[in-house]
Image (cartoon, rainbow, N blue to C red):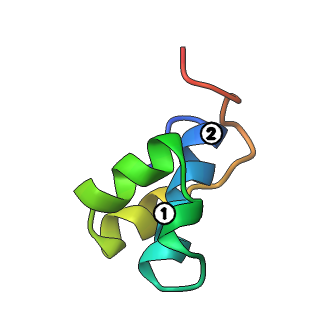
Amino acid sequence: MPAQSKAQQKAAGAALAAKRGEVKMKDLRGASKDMLGSMTERELEELARTPRKHLPEKKG
């Protein structure tokens, strides 16, 4: 499932970094914090790897 916006991709990358222990979980806010608890590492990686070239800044 590819990311639908640059904001979603960025949040997934932050959550993935926290899940891997590269960033402290207490530093996450908003969507990235929600993603951390509800998605697997593989799902987060899939969202974070989406090419950004043609994505809108925000969905909607």
Q: Is residue 41 visible?
A: yes
Quadrant containing the C terminus is top right
x%, y% of residue 56? Answer: 68, 28
Secondary structure beneath dot 2 equals helix
- Three-letter code, disc 1: Ala
Q: Earlier in the sequence, mark 2 or mark 1?
A: 2
**Residue identified by numbered label 2:** 7
Please state which of residues 50 and 11 is positioned toward the viewer in this rendering.
11
Structural crowding at the residue carrying mark 1, measured as other residues with C-alpha within 10 Å and reported as few (<14), some (14–19) or many (≥20): many
Q: Is residue 18 above or below residue 60?
A: below
| Numbered circles on residues, count | 2
- Which mark is on residue 42? none
Q: Determine the residue positioned at 50% across, 40% down.
A: 30
Secondary structure beneath dot 1 equals helix
x%, y% of residue 36? Answer: 36, 60
Answer left or right for 53 relative to 58: right
Structural crowding at the residue carrying mark 2, measured as other residues with C-alpha within 10 Å and reported as few (<14), some (14–19) or many (≥20): some
x%, y% of residue 34? Answer: 36, 47
Answer left or right for 55 relative to 8: right
**Residue found farthest to the right:** 53
- Three-letter code, disc 2: Ala
**Residue identified by numbered label 1:** 15
Q: Determine the residue positioned at 50% across, 86% down.
A: 21
Please state which of residues 52 and 19 is positioned toward the viewer in this rendering.
19
**Residue found farthest to the top:** 60
Q: Nearer the viewer, mark 2 or mark 1?
A: 1
- Cα distance in 3D space between marks 2 and 1: 12 Å
x%, y% of residue 44? Answer: 41, 63
Q: Determine the residue positioned at 55% across, 50% down.
A: 11
Q: Is residue 16 above or below residue 48?
A: below
